[in-house]
Structure formats: structure tokens, C-alpha cells
Image: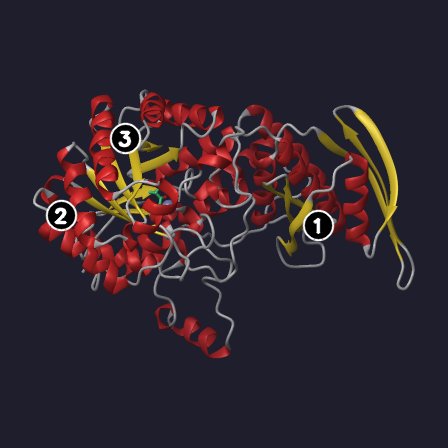
Amino acid sequence: MSSTSQSNTDRVFIFDTTLRDGEQAPGATMTFEEKLQVAELLDNMGVDIIEAGFPIASNGDFEAVSEIARRSKNSVIAGLARAIPADIDRAGAAVRLAPRGRIHTFVSTSPIHLKYQMNKNQDEVLELVTQSVTQARNLIDDVEWSAMDATRTPIDYLAKCVEAAINAGATTINIPDTVGFSVPEEYFAMFKTLIETVPNADKAIFSTHCHNDLGMAVANSIAGVQAGARQVECTINGLGERAGNAALEEIVMALKTRGDALPFHTEIDATHLARASKIVSAACNTPVQFNKAIVGKNAFAHESGIHQDGMLKNAETYEIMTPASVGIKETSLVMGKHSGRAAFKDKLKDLGYELGDNAFQETFVRFKELADRKKNVYDEDLIALVDDEMGSIEDKIKLVAMSVSSAIGGDHTCELTVSVEGDAKSVKVSGTGSVDAIFNAIKEAVGANPHLVHYGVDAVTGGTDAQANAHVRLEMNGKIASGRTAEPDTLVASARAYLNAYNRLLMERGASAQGVMAG
Ligand code: KIV
Ligand code: ZN
């Protein structure tokens, strides 16, 4: 059965929380501009509700939610709030300029959260549900209420809370699997019971919100939909704390591809999925695993001889959806060093990028430099260039010069100059290998010793002249930041990625933000 033939009652609303729950992933902090870019993309691809942030967390979060609200076209813009009056007021103020705004307020309901986190009894929390939803409803008509850690909450108490929230005016009821603990049958049963037994259940839309700790976030979300939920909360690439959230692209394509078994549909334009994945991955400096369903580099690659043979005879032998249906285009050779600005602009447009004047000029200059050094420039190279440009921040520390010498059984030394807010600082430092020497040199030059959480390199395309994509994740004083850079030289890419992460560590984020992370 084709999904478009289904009725409105089978419509599943997609609530994307990449900018809130997703951004809470370690090192995934986005800049203001990156958040606006991701929100615009989500709005264009048909996301019904964009959770744009947690306005009380910091001024930066508040401003990003307000600006996303002001610019929104079709999507409802939601701001998160704890069951605290100041949070709810702040969320209301942040979404005020949205043509359609929502306050999303939550409180924990499970015994373990009540005892250790809230220090409140069930009656007190029940009272909070009514108070918080009532306050939110006095500010806005569209109010979502979430029972944090719902899947570890006794169902009778959960049902009472849901009834109270709906009575107070909540229009969406979210039942999160906050700790990724549930299994599909159990999650299904929870929704069935709530929808069938809570007396006013028909006055709200029920929503899933699943974390992926046991790898069941998507399966659980779909089980919730089968039981009657009509909103799914998810993130691009499954981004999120710990093992992440349910992946938007997997939910959308599961419903689209298996309309026969899952007679539900979304209004997402799936041809935006590949690009959304790339943009979020670049903005958060979080690489997508190669075998990630739908958007991984290998998701449509057929390696075995038997599969390749079948594919040549008829693609449907091994392909349940086409790469084009999720927006993956055949890779193509771009232009060379003689290509002009107009052709370059056209190519970027074709790849789905429209850059402002400054960003365009910068990217064009970098493209020319790359084309001078690299014979073949592919779409992937251009995407890496644009992602670098969009991920660039106002660097306090810049790499000015670097030379590395390395010998088998001998020394590995890095001589490097950085400019620290305009002041040049040169050092010469050795290490156990070239990369170790480079990172040691940077640490000495900047006078800091962040902990290296992750370092990785992969090739943007094939060939020995491929650009190296280097990823670095650093931790310092409880704050984590990631950096990424693509460069033809692996060592330069590594140094720049390290500095990119370090500059992000220095970036202001409201000091209180870490303290008020939600689940
Ligand atoms: O996982 C969770 O419980 C949450 C809530 C804030 C909705 O993210
Ligand atoms: Zn969550």
C-alpha cells in the first residue's frame, strides 16, 4: 500500500529534537549560525515540530530559539522547560515570535527520580504537573507535557499524571523512554493502556521519545505508533546523549518503505535526508558511522560479488529503497582550477548550498587552492569545503606555520607557529609520533593541556590525493568540544582539527547550561 493513500488518522507528526536533545551529545555544541542553518533545513524538509532548544539553559540557547522562532515558516517551534515557573516563562518568551510556538514542559515521574532527583512524593509531583501545564497554557495554546523516565514509572501513577496534564490543557502527551530501557512490546502496551484507559486521552496527541541505550529506539518508537502514538520525537543521525535518540531518517524511511506492514505516513520530504545528515554531522563535528542505516557512507554500497551481480540484473534484488529516494546523488567530478565563480555557485546550488557573500568568497578561494593541489575535485571535496566553512568560528587561535620531521626509529618533531589573538607564538616539540608531536606543540603554544577524547582520520574520496578528514574531540574543565577539518595533507588536517576543537572549547556557552541538561 502506498503511504500517500493513507488517511489523516494515520499521519505521524515528526518532532525533531536535534537542536535540543541532540545537541546535548558530548561535543555536539553548535554555534548560533549552525543552529539557524539546521532549523531552516528541518523546516524545509517538512518537520512538523522543531524543538529548537532549552531557553533557560543559557542566553545563547534563548537567542537561538527566539531567532529560529522568528524565522520559522511551516514548522511549530518548541522550547523546553522544566516544571519551574522561570523556565516556563523563558520558554514562552523564546517562542513568542513563532507563527506557531509550543512550550514543552516536563517533570520526572519514576520512583527513582522522585526519590533521588526531585526529593518529592507522588502527590507533590502530580500537583507540579497541573501547575506547570496551567502556567504554560496561560502563555500559549500549544503545550506539550512529558513524563521524564515514564517507562520506569508505575502505569497507574503515570495515567494519573497524564490525566492531570490533559485536564490542565496539555495538547500533546509525551511518554519518554529516557534511559533507553524499554522493549517494543512493553512500550506498545504502555501506550495502549494510557490511550484506552485515561478518560480524557482523546483530547491529546500521544508522543514517543526513545533513547537508544539498548539499540531499540527506532523499534520502540514504531511500537508506540502502532499502539496509537501520532508524534515521534527523534533526531537527525540519531544524535543525542549516550547512545543517542531515535534516528529521524530511520523512522521516516521505515514508515515509507514498509507501508504494507506499517500503514502510517509522515510529511517529510525524504530526498532531504542525506543532506540533513551531512549538515548535522558537520555542524556537530560528529561523524556518521559508515554502516549507519539510510545515511551511512556504506548504506547503499554492495560489496559482495553475488550482490553486485544481482544489482546489475535488477536493483530490486538487493535494494529495498533507492539512494535517490533519500537524496543521495551519484558522485561526480567537479570542475578544475579554471572553473569560474558562476559555475562554482551553480554546483553548490546543485548540492543544496546557498552561501552568503562572505562565506561564498572564502569557499571559492579555498576551492581554487584545492584545485591547484589536487587533480580531481569531487562533490565530496566540495561538501567538505563548505562544511568546513560553515563550521568555522571566530578563531582565537590560528595555525600560522607548521613543519614536521619524522624518522623511523628516530625523532618526531613539530615546529609550529600559532597566532593567539594576533600574537605569534612559536615552539618546537617532539612526540612519540608525528601526530603526538603536533598535538604536544599546540598544547605548549597555547599553554593548556586539554584531554584528547577522540582523534580519527578518514579519506573524503578515493585515491592517494584524497583530502583527509580529521576529527578531534577535546575535554577540559568538564566541557567537551569537537573539531573537524578536511585538507589534502593529513598532518595539517589533524593540526587544524585540534585547533578547531580547542577554539570551540574557548567559545562562550552559558555557564549554567551544563547544569540544566535534560534527558
Ligand atoms: O529523555 C527525556 O526524558 C527528555 C525529556 C526532557 C522529554 O528528553
Ligand atoms: Zn530525551
The answer to whether residue 455 is left or right of residue 509 is right
Q: Which residue is mark 3?
A: 102
Looking at the image, the residue that sits furthest to the bottom is: 306
Can residue 43 be seen here?
A: no
The Cα atoms of the two marked residues, 2 and 1, are separated by 54 Å
Could you tell me which quadrant the N terminus lies in?
Answer: bottom left
Secondary structure beneath label 1: loop
Indicate the amino acid at tag 2.
Thr
Mark 1: amino acid: Lys
Q: Who is closer to the viewer here, 357 or 509? A: 509
Above or below — where is 12 with respect to 145?
below
Q: Is 75 drawn above or below residue 261 in the view shown?
A: above
Q: Is the residue marked 1 within 8 Å of ligand 2, measured from its CB?
A: no
Going from the N terminus, do you reach mark 3 or mark 2 first? 2
Most foreground residue, 158 or 483: 158
Which residue is the site of mark 2? Answer: 9
Front-most of residues 339 and 256:
256
Q: What secondary structure is marked by label 2?
A: helix
The residue that disc 1 covers is: 375
410, above or below 396, in the image = below
Residue in view at x 56 percent, y 34 percent: 390
